[in-house]
Every structure is written in structure tokens, then in C-alpha cells.
Image: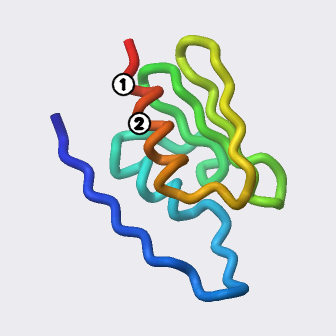
Amino acid sequence: MTELRLIISRPEPGEWLGRLDVVEALEKAGWTGDDDMPLSILRHSSGAVWAVVGDTGDSGLDCPNGALIEFPSDTPTVVIVAACLAAAATP
């Protein structure tokens, strides 16, 4: 199994980086950007799909088992990444 180490610096007050931090972490874990929207939609070979919804930073995860998880924009990156990795690893 590949080891994934995730280090995310806390943004300065008022700084908004969107969800690029999630994109970078998932790409390191083997997820690939969608052809049409590589920074907004990432797919895993398991069938899991994570996508940014609109300009607010909200995002969602479609799990291989059909479940849908929605993340408000203030959801910490580590929570989103952990959920995505768990969804991709679930048989």
C-alpha cells in the first residue's frame, strides 16, 4: 500500500484558496482530474468522484456504493481527503 503524507498549512485570515489543496492531495493518492474540469472534478478507479460545486468552495463526493456526501466550504481539507480515501478504499 502506498503511504500518503498530507501536510496542509492553515491559510491566513481572509485567504481563500478554493479546494486546490484537496485536488493536490487526491492526485498524490492516484485520483485523476476530469478531462473537461481537471481542477474541479477528480475520479478514482474505484468509481468514487469528488467535485467542487459552484464558486463557493462547497464540494461533494459520489461514493462507489451510491452514497453522496456534501461538504460545505468550511469543511477542513483533511476531513474531505479522509472521506475520499475511505470511499475509494471501500469494496
54 lies left or right of 7: right
Q: Secondary structure at mark 2?
A: helix
> Measuring 57% from the left and 59% from the top, which residue is drawn there?
76
Q: Where residue 54 sits: x, y (%)?
A: 83, 52
Q: Where residue 19 sits: x, y (%)?
A: 62, 60
Q: Spatial distance from mark 2 to mark 1, Cα to Cα?
A: 6 Å
Q: Where residue 4 sits: x, y (%)?
A: 26, 50
Q: What is the quadrant of the C terminus in the image?
A: top left
Q: Where residue 26 sits: x, y (%)?
A: 44, 48
Q: In the picture, residue 18 is in which quadrant?
A: bottom right
4 lies left or right of 91: left
> Measuring 41% from the left and 36% from the top, which residue is drawn there?
85
How many numbered dots are placed on residues in this image? 2
> Measuring 42% from the left and 69% from the top, which residue is drawn there?
8
> What kind of residue is marked 1?
Ala
Q: What is the quadrant of the N terminus in the image?
A: top left
* Label 2 crowd (10 A; few <14 / some 14-19 / many >=20): some
The answer to whether residue 35 is seen in the rendering is: no
30 lies left or right of 40: left
Report which residue position mark 1 lands on: 89
* Label 1 crowd (10 A; few <14 / some 14-19 / many >=20): few
Report which residue position mark 2 lands on: 85
Q: What numbered label is drawn on residue 55?
A: none
Q: Do tag 2 and tag 1 residues touch (Cβ < 8 Å)?
A: yes
Q: Secondary structure at mark 1?
A: helix
